[in-house]
Image: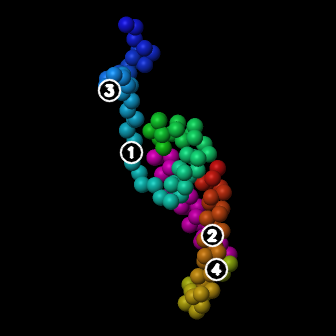
Amino acid sequence: MAKSLFEQMGGAYAQVADYLLPNLILPEEEQKSIGIWGQRHARYLKQNHKVLYMNLLTSGKLNAYLADIDEQAEAMFSQLVKEMADKQGVTEHLKATDQMAWVGKMNAIRNAAIEIVNKELIFV
């Protein structure tokens, strides 16, 4: 029997019941922790860019890619919150004198920063 293209390229089959199934093994990749930003981007890719998601997954680069996106998004978020708080005058003095006003302003700043990060990095 002639070898299939898969066998010619070094692949092998395993017999399971009456079927020959290819022995497919994903390449090893370093497992990095992925935070909320990376998880959001993964969900977005899975739903809206299936080909890119599957290419990254099967090449073994998905985890590293998502970890990188997560780091970039976290850095961008922290920088935006800091800059917006400075620009709007939200300081530790305000926190000490009027906590409710500080919490309200910080929540608004965080929500605006989340929207920017989502638009610029996560849902692209």
Q: Main secondary structure of the magenta part?
A: helix
Q: Which residue lies at the image location 63% right of the left edge and 66% below the top edge?
A: 113
The residue under label 4 is which amino acid type?
Answer: Lys
Does any portion of residue 83 appear in the rendered image?
no
The magenta stretch is: 63-87
The residue under label 2 is which amino acid type?
Answer: Asn
The residue under label 1 is which amino acid type?
Answer: Glu
At label 1, counting other C-alpha atoms closer than 10 Å, the crowd grade (few under 14, some 14-19, many 20 or more) is: few
To which residue does mark 1 refer? 30
Q: Say which element carries label 1.
A: loop
To which residue does mark 4 refer? 105
Residue 66 covered by magenta stretch: yes
Q: Mark 4 to mark 2: distance in Å?
A: 10 Å
The quadrant where residue 7 appears: top left
Q: Mark 3 to mark 4: distance in Å?
A: 62 Å
The quadrant where residue 3 appears: top left
Residue 64 covered by magenta stretch: yes
Tag 1 or tag 4, which sits nearer the N-term? 1
Tag 3 or tag 1, which sits nearer the N-term? 3
Q: Say which element carries label 4.
A: helix
Q: Mark 1 to mark 2: distance in Å?
A: 33 Å
The x, y position of residue 59, in whole percent, is: 47, 35
Q: Say which element carries label 2.
A: helix
Q: Which residue lies at the image location 64% right of the left edge and 75% below the top edge?
A: 108
To which residue does mark 2 refer? 111
To which residue does mark 3 refer? 16
The residue nearer to you, when weighing 80 against 27, is 27
Q: Mark 2 to mark 3: distance in Å?
A: 53 Å
Q: Say which element carries label 3.
A: strand
Q: Mark 1 to mark 3: distance in Å?
A: 30 Å
The residue under label 3 is which amino acid type?
Answer: Val
Q: Which residue lies at the image location 51% right of the left edge and 54% below the top edge?
A: 38
